[in-house]
Image (cartoon, rainbow, N blue to C red):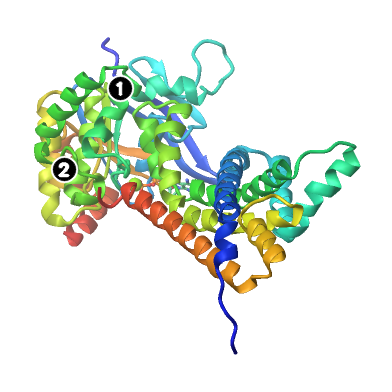
Amino acid sequence: MSQSLVQIRGVKKSFGTTRVLDGVDLDVAKGEVVCVIGPSGSGKTTLLRCINLLETYDDGSIKVDSVEVGYEDGSGSRKRRSERALAPIRADIGMVFQLFNLFPHLSALENVTLGLTKVRGISKAEAKDRATHWLTRVGLADKLQSLPSQLSGGQQQRVGIARAVAMGPKVLLLDEITSALDPELVGEVLSVVQGLAKDGMTMIVVTHEMTFARDVGSRIVFMDDGRVQIDGPSREVLANAASHERLKSFLARIEMKH
Amino acid sequence: MDYHFNFNFVWRYADKLYWGLLLSLEIAFVSILIGMVIGLGLALAYTGGGRLVRTAIAAYVEFIRNVPLLLLVYLVFYGIPSAGGFAYDAQTSFVATLALYSGAYLVEVFRAGLDAIPKGLIDAGKSIGLTPWQRFLYVRMPMMFRIVLPSLSNVYVSLFKDTSLAYVIAVPELTYGANWIKTNTFRVIEVWLVVWPMYLVTCYVLLHGLRLLERRFSLVRR
Ligand SMILES: Nc1ncnc2c1ncn2[C@@H]1O[C@H](COP(=O)(O)OP(=O)(O)O)[C@@H](O)[C@H]1O
Ligand SMILES: [Mg+2]
């Protein structure tokens, strides 16, 4: 049996008394692009944030490359990993944020090299080469020295992607990375993601871009009420949407917004 | 109305003003430096600490901020040594006072700065695998300093002016020098006509320098 790269089992998470994740199961194989869709508030962001422990999960298990991310292996009792112990685990899990979260005091280049030099321990010169390579790849060769404030939203998000990908992560988490962008800038960002998919990058993509989910996603996962309601090959899920009441009405609502 | 200005006396003792100004600057510099260490340390302790730590820090801040600086100067110079049965020189005492005083103001400035760092940047730091210490060094500190720089400028200038209070315990800084000349020559107006622009120009230069620094570290352009 081939083990999934990301294996999520029965994950539960509450904020106070509100249960946000209510037993999530999900498997992502190497090279897969899993698109997570679902109404606002259904727990998509929380799920992604649990995978790299930006939020702790209360119950269940999340394994990335066979390593339980949130808790120390071994002993029966669940002992939370320290922030220090989490750092190398997180370094292997890339994340791109809805609101970019670029370091505003660093240039585009420095945003990418920071993790390479400080976390990966790569020399300054080599880090610069690698960062330049990725920034060129996302079409920002002429913006290396720009501060985030000097870049458009689409450009900032592409720096965000370069920053995550340059680290050489095992899996990339993308949380509605185009929803804060002007419509005319969405394409340039999605085409970068599409290129990564072609290269075989494993990705979990929270998105409302159904065309992208259908054409680029290997699978669609529909979340609602803190659970995975539907999980299947993209085209199949969309073709059978009519027979699933919640998915149907969700897609109808998205359709109207566009 | 026939007062005859005579600056000769002022020029004769100009070195008292010159060295006085230098000492004022030195006192301000050293106390602010110590105050920054106090302020940053306590701001971090406050942000990461429990209730007890927070209450203690808040008490320190409230105490210092609600007592006139002049009273603190007397308290540290006369009060503490007589209670503790030891002595230190006036300048040391004043530097300690101003450091404690600026520390209390800077705690608030730094704390506000730390609070103002967008949460998303910390998340981004975590997501690329920075350890807590690296996040502190490469994300939180540089961001905090950029956020607080404008308020720091104001604190610095007002602390520089506060050095003039050292004259009440006979530290030979600028105001003390001016007073000395005044008492010994009775040229009151002339002395102040010289000292006033000395403070003014120094404050202006300080402020201008800090504005340059702000621009250098601006998040908007380079
Ligand atoms: N830090 C938090 N504290 C309290 N409630 C939260 C927090 N983050 C998210 N929630 C709540 O959890 C629910 C799921 O949020 P989220 O995971 O962001 O959903 P989605 O990304 O699918 O829109 C929402 O009801 C939201 O209000
Ligand atoms: Mg969300």
Q: Which residue occupies the foreground of this view, B18 or B37?
A: B18
Residue holding disc 2: A238
Q: Is residue B7 left or right of residue B169?
A: left
Q: Which residue occupies the foreground of this view, A193 or A143?
A: A143
Helix, strand or loop under label 2: helix
Q: Is residue B55 left or right of residue B135?
A: right
Q: Which residue occupies the foreground of this view, A241 or A193?
A: A193
Q: Residue at x 57, y 44 (%)?
A: B26
Q: Based on the displayed image, in which of its 4 quarters is residue A252 positioned?
A: bottom left
Figure check: B147 above or below A32: below
Q: Is mark 1 within 8 Å of ligand 2?
A: no
Whether residue A216 can be seen here: no
- In the image, what residue type sits under mark 2? Leu
Figure check: B28 above or below B168: above
Contact between marks 1 and 2 (CB within 8 A): the answer is no
Q: Residue at x 69, y 59 (%)?
A: B180
How many numbered marks have been drawn onto this rendered protein structure? 2
Q: Which residue occupies the foreground of this view, B207 or A136?
A: B207
The image shows residue B210 at horizontal and vertical percentages of 41, 52
Q: Quadrant of the N terminus of chain B?
A: bottom right
Helix, strand or loop under label 1: helix
Which residue is the extreme one toward the bottom? B1
Chain under disc 1 = A
Residue holding disc 1: A117
Figure check: A130 above or below A253: above
Q: Is residue A249 left or right of residue B201?
A: left
Q: Residue at x 15, y 29 (%)?
A: A132
Chain under disc 2 = A
The image shows residue B200 at horizontal and vertical percentages of 49, 64
- In the image, what residue type sits under mark 1? Thr
The tag earlier along the polypeptide, 1 or 2, is 1
